[in-house]
Image: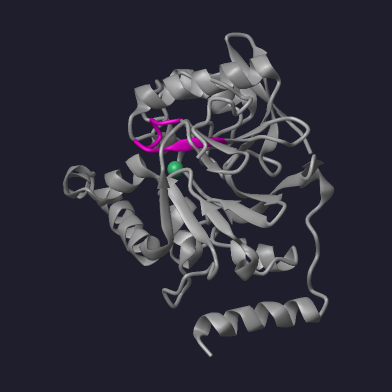
Amino acid sequence: MDWTGKGCRAGASRRDFNRLAIRTLLAAGAAVTLGPRRAMAGGDGTVRTVSDGHLQLPLDFVLPGIPQAELADFRREFGLPQDGLRPECNVTLLRLPGRLVLFDAGAGPNFMPTAGKLPDNLAKAGIDPAEITDVVFTHAHPDHIWGVTDDFDEIVFPNATFRISRTEWDYWRAEETLASMPDERKAFVVGARGRLDAIEPRMALFDAGEEVLPRVEAFDAAGHTPGHMAFVVHGLDDPIMVVGDAVSNDPISFARPDWPWGADHDPARGAATRRRLLDRLAGDRARLVGFHLPGGGIGRAERQGGGYRFVREG
Ligand SMILES: [Zn+2]
C-alpha cells in the first residue's frame, strides 16, 4: 500500500421545510460545535466525526463461531457486557478548500431507534446538509446508506455528489444478491436498492486505487461487503485512513483481528483485510477513524501481543 498517493490513478418542498427548520435552530442559537477531542486540523483540511447515534447488537450475532468458553474468557478480560454490544456510529466529516465531504450518511429514520441522529447532530454543529458537496460511501449497509433519504423519501443532501465503489454498486443491484441473501438480511438488499435508486442521478462510481476526490484515495477493503472501501486522506499533518467497518469493534477487532466477524459477508476475507489494514496502520503510526469505534472513532492502532490495541486520539 502506498500512503503517499503517488499510486493513485489521477483521476416549498418538505426538504425546504427541513432546511428552514435547521436554519431556525441555528438562528435561535441552538448550534453547538462538537468538542475539539473529535476534531483534528492539519494543512488546510480538517477531519472530525459527527455522531449518528448507536446500534444494539447481540454478541452471538457478531461472534457466532467463537466457542462460549473462549468468549467468556475474552469478555472477562476486556470487561465486555453480557447483553451485547452498543457500538457508536461515527460519520466522518472532511473539510477541504471548496469541499465538505461526508463518509457515509448514517442510518436515517427507519433502521434502529437508537440511530439516525446525524441530521440533528449536523444542525447542532452548525452545518446545513445543503453545504455537503460529496457523500463517499464505505459500503451500502443500512447504518451507512439509509440516511441519504428522510421520512418523506427525499434526499437529505440536496447538493451532494454521491460516490460508491463500482463493485459495491454492482453487488447490491445484482439479482443473485437478493436471491442468495438469508431471509433475515433481505431487507438490507431491498433497502440498499431503494436508496441507490434514489441517488442514481447524482452517483459517481470509482474503483480501488483511484483518487475519489483530490487528496482522497480509495483502498480495497473487501470482506465486510464485496465492494467495501477504506479511504486515505492526504495533505493533513498525518495521513488518516477512514476504515469504515473493516475494523469495527474495540477491543474485538484489535485484540482478535482473526476472529470471524458475523457482520462480514465473507468473514475469512474480512479478517484478512482487517489484519492487513491494522498491520500497516500500526507500522506507519498512521491515524484511523472507525465508524463504530468508541469516543468518536479517531485514534491509532498499536501492536500488542499477537494483535493490536486501539489508542483513542483527538
Ligand atoms: Zn457494515
| As drawn, 119 above or below 253 | below
* 274 to the left or right of 236: left
* 125 to the left or right of 206: right
| As drawn, 4 above or below 51 | above
* 238 to the left or right of 164: right
Q: Quadrant of the C terminus?
A: top right
Q: Residue 160's spot in the image, x, y percent?
A: 53, 63
Is 230 covered by the magenta stretch?
yes
Q: Quadrant of the N terminus?
A: top right
Residue for point 52% across, 37% down: 10
User: Ligand 1 is found in which quarter of the picture?
Assistant: top left
**Image: magenta residue range:** 221-231
* Residue 202 visible within the image: yes
Pick the residue in front: 31 or 94. Answer: 94
Residue for point 83% across, 76% down: 29
Q: Residue 12's spot in the image, x, y percent?
A: 53, 90
Residue for point 35% across, 55% down: 192
Q: Residue 245's spot in the image, x, y percent?
A: 50, 37
Residue for point 72% across, 52% down: 97
Is 296 covered by the magenta stretch?
no
Q: Residue 23's spot in the image, x, y percent?
A: 71, 79
Pick the residue in front: 82 or 218. Answer: 218
Magenta: main secondary structure equals loop
* Residue 65 visible within the image: no
